[in-house]
Image (cartoon, helix red, strand yellow):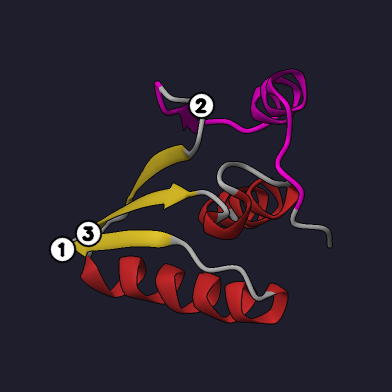
Amino acid sequence: MAREKLGREAVAEALAGLDGWSLAEDGGSIARSFSFRNFSEAFAFMTRVALAAEKIDHHPDWSNIYKTVNVTLNTHDAGGLTALDFELASKMNRYFGG
């Protein structure tokens, strides 16, 4: 998948299809917090996402505090958001919901 930076319209369109994600003020990243019942569920989610991220060679900036996982996505080498960010965000939403 290409690592080409998306324009504002493409970002807005992609973000409209992602529940729970928000755009940073500078438009260069998207973020979401995921809350689970306990640490084990949060860690299992992170493990599943880590495997998916490795597969597409695109890795999140994230942190885990007990049952909460905070995620920020952007493509550093593109200087903003790319299709990879929205692909990974979509996978995270699916893993969280299912």
Rounded to the nearest whole Å, what is the CA distance between mark 3 and mark 2?
A: 28 Å
Identified by mark 2, the residue type is Gly
Mark 1 vs mark 2, foreground winner is: 2
Disc 3 crowd rating (10 Å Cα; few below 14, some 14-19, many 20+) is some
- Specify the segment rendered in magenta: 4-25
Name which of mark 1 and mark 2 comes first in the sequence: 2
- Which residue shows up at 38% across the image and 51% down it? 71
Q: Which amino acid does label 3 sit on?
A: Lys
In the rendered image, the vertical position of residue 98 relative to residue 12, given as above or below = below
Secondary element at tag 2: loop
Q: Residues within 10 Å of mark 2 (few under 14, many from 20)?
A: some
Kindly identify the amino acid type of the residue bearing the numbered disc 1.
Answer: Tyr
Q: In this view, does 41 lie above or below 76?
A: below
Q: Quadrant of the C terminus?
A: bottom right
Answer yes or no: do the residues labelled 3 and 1 have beta carbons within 8 Å? Answer: yes
Q: Residue furthest right?
A: 1
Q: Which residue is drawn at 15% across and 63% down?
A: 66
Say which residue appears at 70% left-offset and 42% top-offset. 5
**On residue 27, which mark appears?**
2
Q: How many labels does the image show?
A: 3
Q: Mark 3 points at which residue?
A: 67
Apparent side of residue 68 relative to residue 29 in the rendered image (left or right): left
Residue tagged 1: 66
Expressed as whole percent of the image width and height from the top left, the position of residue 20 reads 49, 31
Measured as percent of width and height from the top left, residue 35 is found at 31, 48
The secondary structure type at the circle numbered 3 is loop
Residue 86 percent location from the top left of the image: 67, 45
